[in-house]
Amino acid sequence: MSITLWGRRNSANVQKVSWLLAELEMRYEHILVGGSHGGLDAPEYLALNPNAKVPTLRDGELVLWESHAIVRYLSATYASGLLWPVEPRDRALVDQWTDWVATTYQPAWVGVFWDLVRTPPAQQNAEAIRKGVAETVRLQRMMDSRLAEVPYLAGEELTYADIVAGVSLYRWFTMPVDRSSLPHFEAWHERLRARKAFQEAVCVSYEELVGRLAF
């Protein structure tokens, strides 16, 4: 086994992969690319990832890009029965929430992050920020309702669904937004924040991104 991960540490999508690897206590090489590190347009990187984004993962001869594909692969290969439920019915719930994050939740909260944090103050649109926060909170209420029933999104145990959704939490709870009181969502945050892997992979400063739309 020889795993290499490419990406910047303050990328939420990279954090999904680094968090999962930390949960499994797997050793790997991390090559910093993207953001202030540059390198996304280098021919050798494009040969690995023609999409020119992060993350990219190599495991032996296999090269993958797209964070959720990487998370699923690593979970199935190295965490079967743990982060990856064996029973298809159980795994279907994990995939339901994982896909919902990709199509619905992440666009909402990342939109707020771009509008409020990445955009210089003089260029910010207050109405767009208000709408983005309202939509993000609406979706978090869905999670709050689910988390009133079970401790994790797919049930009783941590799965990769919590990882892809949970990378939002450090930014959400450190951004200057009005947060609604969602007790079950907040308790989930506390459960995740107590994990060493979450602290290592997700609680990463995004200071260099503030007021910066592009590098």
Image: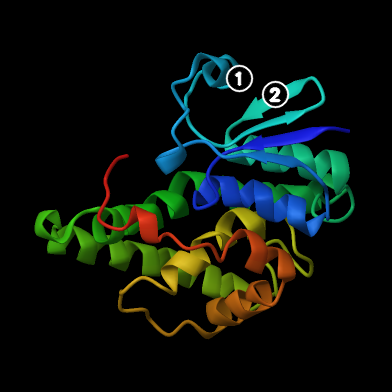
Quadrant of the rendered image containing residue 165: bottom right
Quadrant of the rendered image containing residue 147: bottom right
> Relative to residue 61, is residue 150 drawn left or right?
left
Tell me if residue 127 comes above or below residue 164 in the rendering: below
Residue drawn at the location 21% of the way across and 66% of the way down: 130
- Which numbered tag is attached to residue 63? 2
Residue drawn at the location 68% of the way across and 55% of the way down: 19
Tell me if residue 5 comes above or below residue 170 in the rendering: above
Tell me if residue 63 comes above or below residue 31 in the rendering: above
- Which numbered tag is attached to residue 48? 1
- Which numbered tag is attached to residue 185? none
> Relative to residue 114, is residue 102 drawn left or right?
right
Q: Is residue 160 visible?
A: no
Amino acid type, mark 1: Leu
> Relative to residue 208, is residue 13 drawn left or right?
right
Q: CA distance from mark 1 to mark 2?
A: 7 Å
Residue drawn at the location 12% of the way across and 54% of the way down: 123
Q: Are marks 1 and 2 in contact (CB under 8 Å)?
A: yes
Secondary structure beneath dot 1 equals: helix
Q: Position of residue 171 (x, y in %)?
A: 44, 65
Report crowding for label 2: few under 14, some 14 to 19, many 20 or more residues within 10 A (C-alpha): some
Q: Position of residue 8 (x, y in %)?
A: 52, 44
Q: Position of residue 214 (x, y in %)?
A: 29, 40
Amino acid type, mark 2: Val
Q: Is residue 33 visible?
A: yes
Depth order, front residue of 10/82: 10
Q: How many marks?
A: 2
Mark nearer the N terminus (1 vs 2) = 1
Residue drawn at the location 53% of the way across and 62% of the way down: 204
